[in-house]
Image: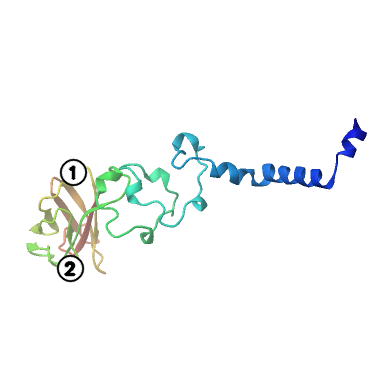
Amino acid sequence: MFSTLKTRMTYANVASTTALVLVIGGGGAAVAASMVPANSVGSRQIVNNSVKTADLKDGGVTGTDLKDGGVTGADVADGGLSGSDLAGGAIDRPGLFGTGDLGVVRAYAWNNSPSADANLTNNGYTYNRSGGAVNVVHNGTGSYTVTFAGLNLNGGNVVVSGYGGSATWCKVGSWGSSSVNVRCFDAAGAPVDDYWTLAASD
């Protein structure tokens, strides 16, 4: 049997057999890939976690490719996104992320009127997400109420800090609806009028 096989092992037979093995083993994947119909690979055919960054071309996935809520904070590694990765206006619906997922700013203010009522809206360091006015009422020494018209502050977080180099300190007295009560004190703990800054976030 071996002698019969040996007599048939011509150069042409060996070369053609070798070529066949190479096609099946090396080039077979390319041939198989060319036989897959267009748009026939879907989520069911992709192994979970098998698609890597290197498999995606730059700009290959855009906002229109993602359904609302399709990407959450848990899907992004720490430092995985920076400002340069987001187009202008890419986050225009803070509620899309859910309360607590992002510290989205609702409002901030700088009180540059320590001893009198004032409209802070246009002092250059004030913001109200509702677009409404921002006013502060001086209730008495070291006591203020700042109101962000049209803004609901319930359920968020508010931080107040004294402004400037004096030895005074300020804190949140309370907040709710669209207003925040602020209290300021000197080093001895007595109420005192002072400059302060305020920030409200989701």
Residue 190 makes an appearance in the image: no
Tell me the residue that label 2 is attached to. Answer: 124
Residue 146 placement, left or right of 167: left
Packing grade of label 2 (10 A; few <14, some 14-19, many >=20) is few
Q: Residue at x 29, y 55 (%)?
A: 90
Whether residue 50 can be seen here = yes
Coloring applied to the structure:
rainbow
Q: Secondary structure at mark 2?
A: loop
Query: Which badge, 1 or 2, comes first in the chain's sequence?
Result: 2
Q: Percent position (x, y) of residue 181?
A: 15, 51
Please state the horizontal and vertical placement of residue 141, each as a whole percent of the image: 11, 59
Pick the front one: 109 or 112: 109
Identify the mark at residue 67; answer none if there is no mark: none
- The residue drawn where x is 40% and y is 56% is 59
Question: How far, Cα to Cα, is label 1 from label 2?
Answer: 25 Å
Tag 1 and tag 2, C-beta contact below 8 Å: no
Q: Is residue 135 left or right of residue 17?
A: left
Of 40 and 68, nearer the camera is 40
Residue at the top extreme of this rendering:
1
Q: Give the camera-side residue of 63 and 182.
A: 63
Q: Quadrant of the N terminus?
A: top right
Front-most of 125 and 191?
Answer: 125
Total marks placed: 2
Q: Mark 1 falls on what kind of element?
A: loop
Q: Position of residue 88 (x, y in %)?
A: 29, 60
Left or right position of 167 against 128: right
- Residue named by callout 1: 154
For badge 2, the amino acid type reads: Gly
When asked about the image quadrant of residue 4, the answer is top right
- The image shows residue 104, relative to residue 24, as above or below, that is below
Question: Are there few (<14), some (14-19), or many (20+) residues within 10 Å of tag 1?
Answer: few
